[in-house]
Image: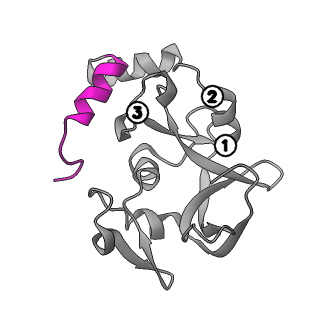
Amino acid sequence: MRVGQAMTRKSVHEIDEVLDKVLYVSRGLGRHCRRLIGGDMMDMSSPRYQCFQLKGIKCAECGIEGKFFAKEKSDDKHYSWHFNLYALDAKGREVLMTKDHIIPYKRGGENHLANFQTMCKPCNEKKYLTMPNADVADRIRWECGMDLRDYVEYYKSKKSLRD
């Protein structure tokens, strides 16, 4: 979605209603990646949905937590319905939650689940093109016994995230 692009909202959904239907298959399998949700066949193999399901719905930076999914589409006729995760700030305003590359893609980071984290849009925009802080790298080293780039390579080599 391009910045400033108008969106149409069709419905609002509970977190579990969406995350319970996430699929871990190769994208591009057409109808095999779709699930019926709220009257529409939705592609549920999105890396964004996988990130939210496996990495959580809290911003890795500020901790704001996603509260609901909205079924939306761009007013541009080329886009289909998809789910966007939203949190609510202290004033009750909606804050879009995003899938962020821990090591930025433009800095050599992989477009893979192991290199994704959940971030709110304001934190993601502040982070733009910066490398992960020492806390993130230390956490990965402690949890996995490997540095961040090795961690990304390890998960890239896995054929399936679920058995």
Disc nearer the start of the sequence (3/2) = 3
Q: Is 127 situated left or right of 21 in this image?
A: right
Please tell me whether residue 159 belongs to the stretch shown in magenta. yes
Q: Choose between 77 and 54: the one closer to the eye.
A: 77
Q: Position of residue 83 (x, y in %)?
A: 54, 64
Label 3: how many Cα within 10 Å (few below 14, some 14–19, many 20+): many
Q: Give the residue at x 69% y 29%.
A: 126
Residue 52 located left or right of residue 60: left
Q: Tags 3 and 1 in contact by the CB under 8 Å rule?
A: no
Residue receiving disc 1: 121
Q: Name the residue under label 2.
A: 128
Measured Cα–Cα span from mark 3 to mark 2 = 15 Å
Magenta residues span: 147-163
Image point 34% across, 20% down: which residue? 149
Q: Is residue 94 above or below residue 79?
A: above
Image quadrant containing the N terminus: bottom right
Residue 22 percent coordinates (x, y): 37, 62
- Specify few, some or many for label 2: CA neighbours under 10 Å numbering under 14, 14-19, or 20 or more: few
Secondary structure beneath label 2? loop
Q: Position of residue 15 (x, y in %)?
A: 52, 63
Q: Distance between the residues labelled 3 and 1?
A: 17 Å
Q: Is residue 89 magenta?
A: no
Mark drawn on residue 115: 3
Which residue appears at 60% of the width and 31% of the height? 61
